[in-house]
Amino acid sequence: MRIRSKAKAVFTAAIFCTATGLLGAQQKPADKSQPWMNPHLSPERRAELVLQQMTLDEKIAMLHGEGMAASKNLPPEMQAVHGLFNGGAGLVITPQRLGIPLIQMSDAAYGVRDSAMNGRYSTALPSNLASAASWDPEAACSYGGLIGRELRAQGYNMTLGGGVDLTREPRNGRTFEYMGEDPVLAGTLVGNRIRCEGAEHVISDIKHYAMNDQESGRVNVDVHIGERAMRESDLLAFQIGVKTGHPDAVMCSYNGVNGDYACENRYLLTDVLKKEWNFPGFVVSDWGGTHSTEKASAAGLDNEEEGNDFYGAALKSAVQAGRVPMAEFDEHVRRILWAEFASGVVDNPAKKSVVDVQGGFDISRHIAEQSSVLLRNQQNLLPLDKAKVQSIAVIGFHADTGMISGGGSAQVDAPGDTSGGAWHREVWFPTSPLGALKAKAPGAKFSFASGENIAEAVAQAKSAEVAVVFAWQWESEGMDLPNLSLPEKQDKLIAAVAAANPHTIVVLETGTAVTMPWLDQTGAVLEAWYAGSKGADAVANLLFGDVNPSGKLPMTFPRSEADLPHPTVIQPPAGSKNGVLSFKVDYNEGLKVGYKWYDAEHKQVLFPFGFGLSYTSFSYSGLTVSPDGSSVSFTVANTGQRAGSEVAEVYASLPDSAGEPPKRLIGWQKVELAAGENKTVHLAINPTYLSIWDEATKKFVRPSGSYRVMVGGSSAELPLTTEISVK
Ligand code: BGC
């Protein structure tokens, strides 16, 4: 494995503890006869009963974290607290004397983090962006379910996953952790992931609320955006995610939004999340994202992570002096207790057990197969014929041994990589593309070149019937990409290989869009994203046609950075410190995120949102839309020779008076069809998806006038169209 290490930039430093005095009492086992242990009572009632028993210190302890467990160099008096850590990103000390389990948190974006270094194992799923490319709520559900089970098996009872910041800035280093550029797709899929993760009895989470759309200067950036634009884009994704997934916790983000840090932003936390959306759980700050005591408390922040700068002694004195009202303070505690009861972690505490490794492999591979997107396939170069193909040159960095994964707090440890919680270094998972391809075509001759020596790669490509180039682009939290080009001369490598062999297939392992100056020279391109523990097997199944590709892009691939709303990622001024909003980013493209931007600005793209090829072909017919737009029906037929699945997409144009971009996604269905088969799809359309945010009445409203409903296989190819008129 190639290693490029950088220290974790922020917030891994100290272990905090205000709870030393509580520890003795906490070791007592739960008394099941206590009234709040009755599972027939509502979580609200049970939380209230516990709250009545708690001391001030116990309440304070529940409102902050104890520092990151990974920190070493503990002072001796902290050893007792450290003994309670399960080794994840956070610990909250709860009144165990009352039967309330400690909250043991682990990052879990695409799998449980920090496993190997704790002597454990977890499955790496394909990246979150990949799972969005499946367009499949069931795949999102199995994604969440697997993570929930593996968290519990490792002794965790709270997940820090569920990222759904919109891909407004595709160079954002966390694009792989999110669900793409459309709020309806992203919100629906993250909601299904959270729903099924929570069903495994872990405290579930959605993050980073809100507008954390770039990593550059994330702790100093003040995002400026209009209310309507925010409600119809990033906040709509969260709204759908909260409504669909019922997360127990919401993580507020590092950045500021319209003048206030997100974690002390009353509009976001109280007005929208808690009041309008009726979110019953607790708000947890991102690690080091709390900046005040009274202001944050009044705004609706319930739990400070990772330490206790503002919600430890400072909160205690604020409560004692009446600067934080008791009712407001109790409400923070009540919400955390509610989450413990509602998630089931009180009645079903996490128990360490053996992770089902094979089960994880199967789910991970299946999702990778569902989410890879076939972008190009000239003259049906793919699928390769196992019996006929004579020789294959496999080219690419680590393509003999592994596939790349996403970094930062999302990083899942590769099995056996005990070097200690990778933060900023490239990690390849041991899933061998060369091995997986060889296993498919044992009769063919294989060669391998890493691509570092372009002449060597070209020579091998020339002497083989087919060349498969595995190209990568690494992303991580805490950085943005300088541009959307493949790094390290890979564009040159691919162009040279493709010039040498017209049967060149490019497999992309990327966390976001990439530009492809070599595209026209290639035979085929498959976007495999960060493909997870069994990525190579999935790619081999797809290239040889054992699985028919069915993924569709959850984000636009632009032709160049010049076409983005912001030509460069805006950087913080030198010397910016956490705690001060030192620069402004004006997201003046507003609700025109992704395809809405390119459509409105009439910009050609490399590959449009919703695009993806199959080894079969589909046709669409018979569109009918109910007069109020609440239901849509149409027929999809498989007109080719192979079974396949088609993501059938439904878009709408709103009346001109609405002042909206040309179209928006309002629904879709993934339809599985045998060769020659057809199916009629009936979709109920959520009225919000046909609405606009009205700043005057603070509601989504349906403008009256003429709506165009369009159906097809990509945002740029919509063969069925009809109009309805809404009064
Ligand atoms: C990230 C969060 C993560 C937390 C704990 C922060 O740096 O932004 O997503 O959950 O660290 O590791």
Image (tube, rainbow, N blue to C red):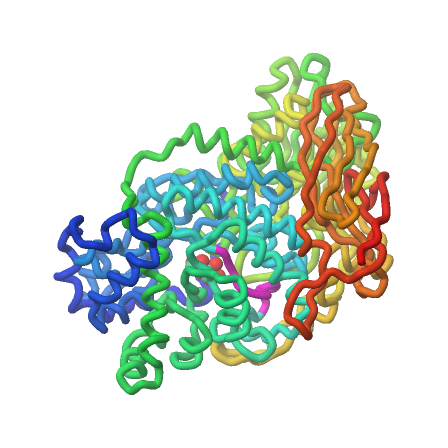
The residue at the point 79 percent across, 54 percent down is 663
Queried whether the magenta region covers residue 642, the answer comes back as no
- The magenta span reads 206-216
Residue 429 higher or lower than 664, as above or below: above
- Name the quadrant containing residue 530: top right
Residue 560 in the image, given as x and y percentages of width and height: 78, 56
Residue 33 higher or lower than 440, as above or below: below
Classify the position of the C terminus by image quarter: bottom right
The residue at the point 45 percent across, 33 percent down is 360
- Name the quadrant containing residue 323: bottom left
Left or right: 695 with respect to 203?
right
Residue 384 in the image, given as x and y percentages of width and height: 71, 22
Please give the count of numbered marks on the rendered protein.
0
Residue 166 in the image, given as x and y percentages of width and height: 63, 58
The residue at the point 35 percent across, 61 percent down is 336
Q: Main secondary structure of the magenta part?
A: loop
The residue at the point 22 percent across, 61 percent down is 95
